[in-house]
Image (spheres, rainbow, N blue to C red):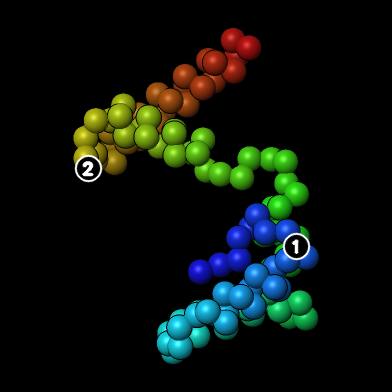
Amino acid sequence: MCVSTGTPTEEIDECWSMIHAEAPVNENLMKRMDYFVDTYLNNDACMFDRKIWNHFNTDKTLTTNHLEGWHAALNRSINRPKPNIFLLINEIKNQQQNFELDIAAQ
């Protein structure tokens, strides 16, 4: 339940109105929707300006795919479902050393 961060800024209010109009009547959902409006949409008093969270015109990376890729590689290198903290720390240190060598080689 959110107005997409990829929605053009000038269409956010209209998009939210459509979402609000089609939402089922449910007390918990209404509380969440009110929170969303107060936090992100209320132009007069929202916590986060639309310029902060709206990325319609952003040319930078918009996903966390690079982080998810690193996390998947970390899991493969540890190769245990529940590693202990020392194994995790050692693997992160190894990766840090490899990254530093890659940077130095450039």
Q: Is residue 88 left or right of residue 18?
A: left
The quadrant where residue 36 appears:
bottom right
Q: Which tag is nearer the camera, tag 2 or tag 1?
A: 1
Write the residue at 63% across / 12% down.
Answer: 106
The residue tagged 2 is 82
Q: Is residue 45 left or right of residue 68?
A: right
Q: Secondary structure at mark 1?
A: helix
Q: Which x, y percent locates residue 76?
A: 30, 29
* Residue type of the residue flagged with mark 1: Thr
Question: Does residue 3 sit above or below 5 in this rendering?
Answer: below
Number of residues whose C-alpha sits closer than 10 Å to that of mark 1, classed few (under 14), some (14–19) or many (20 or more): some
Write the residue at 47% across / 26% down.
Answer: 96
The disc at residue 9 is 1
Q: Is residue 44 visible?
A: yes
Q: Secondary structure at mark 2?
A: loop
Write the residue at 47% across / 19% down.
Answer: 98
Q: Which x, y percent locates residue 101?
A: 53, 15
* Residue type of the residue flagged with mark 2: Lys
Depth order, front residue of 104/3: 3
